[in-house]
Amino acid sequence: MFFCWWHLCLCVVWHTVSPAESDSWRAEIPHSMVGLDGSCVVIPCHFSYPGPIRKASDLTGIWITDSNEKVFHSVTSKISNVFQGRTSLTGDLSHRNCSLKINPLHHSDNGPFTFRIEIEDYGKYSFTQSKVFISIKDSPAHPTLSAGTEMRSGKKVTTSCSVSHSCPSDPPHITWNHPGTLNSQSQEQIKGQWKMTSSLSFTASKMDHNKPLICTAVFPGGKKVTNQTTLNVKYPPDIVEVISESSVREGDSVDLNCSSNGNPAVHAYQWLTSSGTLLSEERTFTLQRVSRHDEAPYCTAINTEGRASSRPAQLNVVYPPEIKVGSSCTSEISVVMCLCMVDSHPASDIRWWGPDPSTELRSSSTERHGSLTVVTLQGTLGFSDTVHCSASNSEGNSTLTLHVPHNGQLLYISLAVCALVVTITGLSIWILKRKCNRTGQNTADPKTEMNTAPFQVDSQRKCKDPPPNYKEVQHVYGNMTFDEEDHPYECATGADTIYANI
């Protein structure tokens, strides 16, 4: 019976007294901390006390120095002037959190600092066994920068930048010099220290290779520190070019060099024709007996990440002028047109001249189509049988004599003159015949109205032939009068005088 009663009493006591009531006066405060001058520091603090849980209004938290200087007091007016406006509690005393924030931190705020709790109608206690010292630095430590060693163009990478601090309520702000996706977090370390980490994710490209990646941490108060690393991005060759001499004379040899980028460096080369024929596997390829008509090769560069090819080699082949087949002269009536077509590189200076080499003929027009120059000469060249076209450049010169066709021209003129003579002759004969017909009609009409019997004898008269020759008569057209006595030219009409156009 006694045993049961004692057991019941123990159970009652166990349930009526909470574990907190059995706690002793105790505080958890780091012995030492590191702070940044001009920034802020939060001293982590947790305390316990015996007895029941009290409400916040029953608790007064105080931080003091060894000289009993009030660093913080729940009653603001009791705070020392040295710390006035710079200190506050970041925790809730009712939850037994006594963390102290000092912002900004001065060089003189090195401690030691002690926390004291006063509980209304219960008691007071200073945790002198849990003092804290603050080591104050003028500048923060450099961030720790971590970048992946295996970066490949086109692949996503993640880098991180970490910095230590002692102010979790106002952590440093970390920025990057490279765009990307950011993720930041602050983690608690030991002795009131925290680590702020910022992660940057981006897709690497060849443009990032050998570029600096910089992270910058800015602390409360404005102090900042940076750290950087050089990015090493692997990528295949993508800029491959053929390098050669500025110009090569046709028939000579030329060295072609393959230039390329890429990371890691290119370790193999190939020289190929457009049909895929392999010419060489060296970085430098010698092209023999260069011709303007050669098929230009191209270069392929290879590294561990891939390969890329250049465009066909752009050879600047120089050669002397060549006057092409098809250069000739044509004529129409009195105008001659000559064409001189010259293939050369560089472009040629083209001249014309006729029988006299010292007299240059001016070209009518000049056209250039790549390496081909077409020059036109148009005009009246008289009766010259030839014209000369001369072309010259830095590599040489060439001259061609062109034949000027005149036969067609003279034929056209002769035919025109003959046609004119025939037309004039025919017209003259037609006019003369028409006049004679009109004269015969005019003399025959009166005989039909008159008695012609008395004149029968006269009508038998016949016209006598005119004189067979007119000496020294120079007129082609003219009115001429003949007397019947001197030159009897008698017709049946009985006219005494005849006028005629001869």
Image (tube, rainbow, N blue to C red):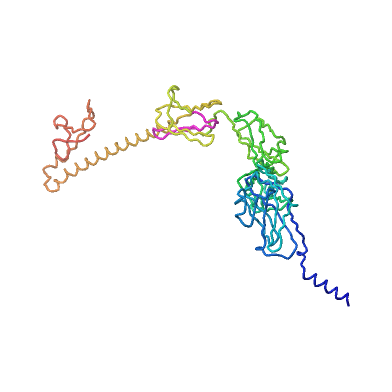
On the image, the x and y values in percent for residue 499 come to 17, 36
Residue 377 lies left or right of residue 103; in this view the side is: left
Q: Considering only vertical position in the picture, is 69 above or below 484? A: below
On the image, the x and y values in percent for residue 103 come to 62, 50
Residue 455 lies left or right of residue 159; in this view the side is: left
Residue 235 lies left or right of residue 367; in this view the side is: right
Residue at far bottom of view: 1
Q: Considering only vertical position in the picture, is 194 above or below 346? A: below
On the image, the x and y values in percent for residue 438 come to 20, 43
Q: Closest to the observer: 281 or 439?
A: 281
On the image, the x and y values in percent for residue 422 come to 32, 36
Residue 500 lies left or right of residue 113; in this view the side is: left
Q: Is residue 348 visible?
A: yes
Q: Closest to the observer: 225 or 393?
A: 225
Start-end of magenta stretch: 327-349
Q: Quadrant of the N terminus?
A: bottom right
Secondary structure mostly taken by the magenta-highlighted segment of the chain: strand
Q: Quadrant of the C terminus?
A: top left
Q: Closest to the observer: 454 or 43?
A: 43
Q: Considering only vertical position in the picture, is 166 above or below 337? A: below
Q: Is residue 296 magenta?
A: no
Residue at horizontal 63 percent and vertical 39 percent from the top: 312
Residue 306, by quadrant, is top right
Q: Is residue 340 magenta?
A: yes
Q: Is residue 159 visible?
A: no
